C-alpha cells in the first residue's frame, strides 16, 4: 500500500514540476487536492460499507501519490509569489512550523477518530480536509504565469535539467541528501523501534523519542523566524551535522534522557536546514523555473529512501543493530562533510534586502 503511493510520487515529480511552471501554481494545487480528496473519499466509502479490498487501496494509493507529485512542486514554487522577497525566510519557517505542528497533532487526532468512529470515518475526515484545502488555496489571487517561449514537455524537461546541472551547490546538496535521507531515515525509522523494544521501554519510549524529534523540528522552525545567517548554505550544511547524534545515542544505547536530547537536536538540525535551503532556492532560482528545480530536488532526495527502508533490516541482521546505527551515522556525516569543501556552498550569501524585490510574473494581458 505504501509502495503504491510512493512509486507514482517519484515517477511523476518531474511532470508535476513542469506543469507547475506552466500553469498558475495555486490552480495546480487545487486540482491535486480535489483528486486526493476524491481518492480518500472513495476509500472511506469502501471501508464504511465493508467492501474494501487490498487492490482498492492500492489503486487509490496510486491516484493519491500521483496527485501529490503535482502538489509538492507547485506548493514550493508558490511561496515567492505570495510574500515580499525580504520575508521569504520567515514565510518558509512559518510554513514548516505549521506543518510540523500538524504532524504532532494530526497523529493524535487520527488515532482518536479511528478509536471513536472507525477507520472509514477517519479517512472521510481526511478527505474533507483535502477539499477544505482546495477551497482555501482556490481563494488565492495570483498573476497568471505565461511561458517565456512556446515549448514542449521534453524541451521543458531538458531546460530544467540544464538549470539544475548548472548550479553546483544545488546538485551537490541534492546528491548529499539522496544518501542522507536513505541512510538516516532507514536506520532511524526501522531500527529505532527495535532498540526501544529490546533496550528501552518499548513503544512508549519510542513514541516519546519521535515526539521529541518533532518538537525539535518545531523549535528549528521557530528559530528560523529570527535567525538570519548571511551564508545560507554553509549554515544549513553545518546544521545537518546535528542529525547523526541520535543514531549514535540509539546505537549504544544511552540513557533515554540523553537520546531525547539527541533527538531534539536532530529535529533542530533538520528544520534549520529546511528553512535555509528553501530560502536559498527561492532567492537564487528564477520564478519560472522554480517548481521544475524543486521537482529535481525532491526526486533526488526521495528516490533512495525506499531502498534505505528495505535494506536497514537485512544489514542489521548481518552486522548487528548497533553497528548498523553507527554506520548510518558515519555515512550521514561522510556525505555531509565534503559538501563544505564546495566553494559555492561556503560562499553563497543571502541577497541583501534592497536587492530582494517581490516576484512579479507576467500576466496574459501584459504579454498581449
Image: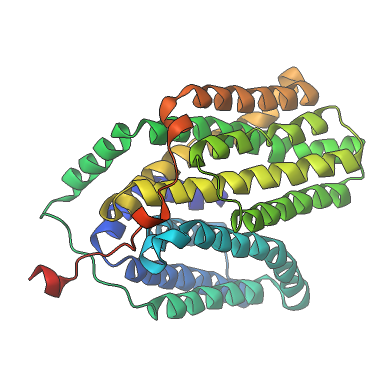
Q: Is residue 228 visible?
A: yes
- Residue drawn at (30%, 55%), measured in percent from left and top? 287
Question: Residue most toward the left?
Answer: 368
- Residue drawn at (24%, 70%), measured in percent from left and top? 144
Q: Position of residue 304 (x, y in %)?
A: 51, 34
> In the displayed structure, would residue 77 be above or below residue 143?
above
- Residue drawn at (27%, 39%), measured in percent from left and top? 163
Q: How many marks?
A: 0
Q: Position of residue 284 (x, y in %)?
A: 36, 46
Q: Camera-side residue: 28 or 285? A: 285
Q: How is the image coloured?
A: rainbow
78 left or right of 279 in image? left
5 left or right of 250 in image? left
Question: Residue most toward the top?
Answer: 319
Q: Camera-side residue: 49 or 83? A: 83
Q: Is residue 71 visible?
A: no
Q: Position of residue 308 (x, y in %)?
A: 59, 33
269 left or right of 305 in image? right
Task: Quadrant for residue 363, please give it.
Answer: bottom left
> In the displayed structure, would residue 65 be above or below residue 264?
below
> In the displayed structure, would residue 301 be above or below residue 212?
above
Q: Position of residue 151 (x, y in %)?
A: 12, 51
Question: Residue most toward the front?
Answer: 354
Q: In what quadrant of the picture does the C terminus appear? A: bottom left
- Residue drawn at (62%, 38%), measured in percent from left and top? 239
> In the displayed structure, would residue 148 be above or below residue 349?
below
Amino acid at each position: 500500500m505504501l509502495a503504491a503511493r510512493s512509486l507514482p510520487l517519484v515517477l511523476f515529480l518531474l511532470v508535476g514540476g513542469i506543469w507547475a511552471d506552466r500553469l498558475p501554481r495555486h490552480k495546480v494545487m487545487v486540482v491535486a487536492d480535489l483528486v486526493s480528496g476524491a481518492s480518500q473519499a472513495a476509500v472511506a466509502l469502501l471501508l464504511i460499507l465493508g467492501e474494501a479490498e487490498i487492490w482498492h487501496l492500492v489503486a487509490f494509493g496510486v491516484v493519491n501519490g500521483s496527485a501529490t507529485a503535482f502538489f509538492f512542486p507547485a506548493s514550493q514554487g508558490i511561496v515567492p509569489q505570495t510574500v515580499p522577497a525580504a520575508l521569504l525566510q520567515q514565510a518558509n519557517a512559518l510554513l514548516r512550523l505549521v506543518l510540523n505542528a500538524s504532524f504532532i497533532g494530526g497523529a493524535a487526532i487520527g488515532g482518536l477518530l479511528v478509536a471513536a468512529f472507525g477507520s472509514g470515518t477517519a479517512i472521510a475526515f481526511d478527505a474533507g480536509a483535502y477539499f477544505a484545502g482546495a477551497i482555501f488555496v482556490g481563494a488565492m489571487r495570483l498573476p497568471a504565469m505565461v511561458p517565456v517561449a512556446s515549448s514542449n514537455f521534453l524541451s521543458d524537461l531538458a531546460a530544467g535539467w540544464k538549470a539544475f546541472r548548472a548550479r553546483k551547490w544545488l546538485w551537490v546538496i541534492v546528491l548529499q541528501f539522496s544518501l542522507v535521507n536513505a541512510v538516516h531515515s532507514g536506520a532511524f525509522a526501522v531500527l529505532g523501534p527495535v532498540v526501544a523494544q529490546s533496550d528501552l521501554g518499548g513503544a512508549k519510549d519510542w513514541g516519546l523519542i519521535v515526539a521529541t524529534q518533532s518538537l525539535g523540528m518545531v523549535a528549528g522552525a521557530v528559530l528560523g523566524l529570527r535567525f538570519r545567517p548571511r551564508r545560507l548554505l554553509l549554515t544549513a550544511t553545518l546544521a545537518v551535522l546535528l542529525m547523526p547524534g541520535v543514531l549514535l545515542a540509539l546505537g549504544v544505547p544511552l540513557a533515554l534522557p540523553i537520546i531525547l536530547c539527541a533527538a531534539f537536536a536532530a529535529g533542530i538540525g533538520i528544520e534549520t536546514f529546511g528553512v535555509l535551503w528553501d530560502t536559498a532556492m527561492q532567492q537564487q532560482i528564477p520564478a519560472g523555473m522554480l517548481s521544475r528545480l524543486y521537482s529535481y530536488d525532491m526526486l533526488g532526495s526521495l528516490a533512495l529512501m525506499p531502498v534505505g527502508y528495505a535494506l536497514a533490516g537485512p544489514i542489521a541482521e548481518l552486522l548487528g543493530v548497533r553497528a548498523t546505527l553507527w554506520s548510518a551515522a558515519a555515512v550521514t556525516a561522510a556525505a555531509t562533510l565534503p559538501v563544505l569543501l564546495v566553494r559555492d556552498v561556503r560562499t553563497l550569501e543571502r541577497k541583501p534586502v534592497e536587492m530582494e524585490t517581490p516576484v512579479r510574473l507576467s500576466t496574459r494581458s501584459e504579454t498581449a
